[in-house]
Amino acid sequence: MKIPISVLVVIYTAKKEVLLLERADHPGYWQSVTGSLDAVDEPLAAAAAREVFEETGIQLHKQANAKLIDLQHHIHYEIYPEWRHRYAPGVTQNLEHWFALELDARIPITLSPREHLSYQWLPLVKAADLCFSPSNQAAIKKLNSD
């Protein structure tokens, strides 16, 4: 069962181009990197780095100027009914912690085919508009306000 605590990582370049991934289990749903903690005591930054690697192939320690930034923001949201079977019975809420990963420029992405179909780099506002998740939209827009 999944732990209802997750990380959201908005990956973007110095030119404010945002990486979006298309979900394999729901074509047409675009999002940033997301994922649940593997253990309740997994450090949030470690979970963010792990999810970035699992979903994009980006190894933070190999990116000279990459900056993983804890946005010091979290939200509770209702888990979509179609995905509640992944959690313990009765779990309907998730606690999501926001991170950003700044890269100097676009880099090659290696998708996890079981999770994502494709990816694209978009200007910040277009990326926010394309995301299906309101919290993901808000996290991207937060980058524009900082």
Image (spheres, rainbow, N blue to C red):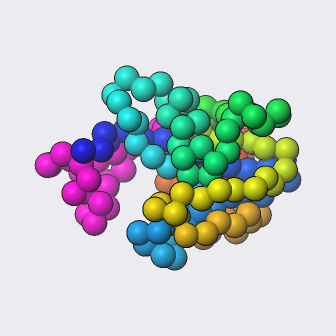
Which residue appears farthest toward the left when viewing the image? 89
**Image point 14% across, 49% down: which residue?**
89
Q: Which residues are magenta?
A: 73-97
Magenta stretch: residue 122 in it? no
Please state the horizontal and vertical placement of residue 17, each as a whole percent of the image.
Answer: 77, 58
Between 58 and 127, the residue placed more toward the observer is 58
**Image quadrant where residue 103 sits:** top right
Instruction: Give the position of the N terminus as an image quadrant.
Output: top left
Q: Quadrant of the C terminus?
A: top right
Name which residue lies at 64% across and 48% down: 57
Residue closest to the eye, 79 or 64: 64
- Percent of width and height locating residue 13: 79, 50
Tell me the residue at 69%/67% (across/down). 120
Residue 110 in the image: state x and y as whole percent. 65, 56
- Reply above or below: 16 against 122: above
Magenta span includes 87: yes
Front one among 56 and 10: 56
Left or right: where 131 falls relative to 127? left
Q: What residue lies at 41% left-to-right and 69% top-to-bottom?
A: 25
Tell me the quarter of the picture where residue 125 sits. Answer: bottom right
Give x and y (percent) for residue 99.
Answer: 59, 39
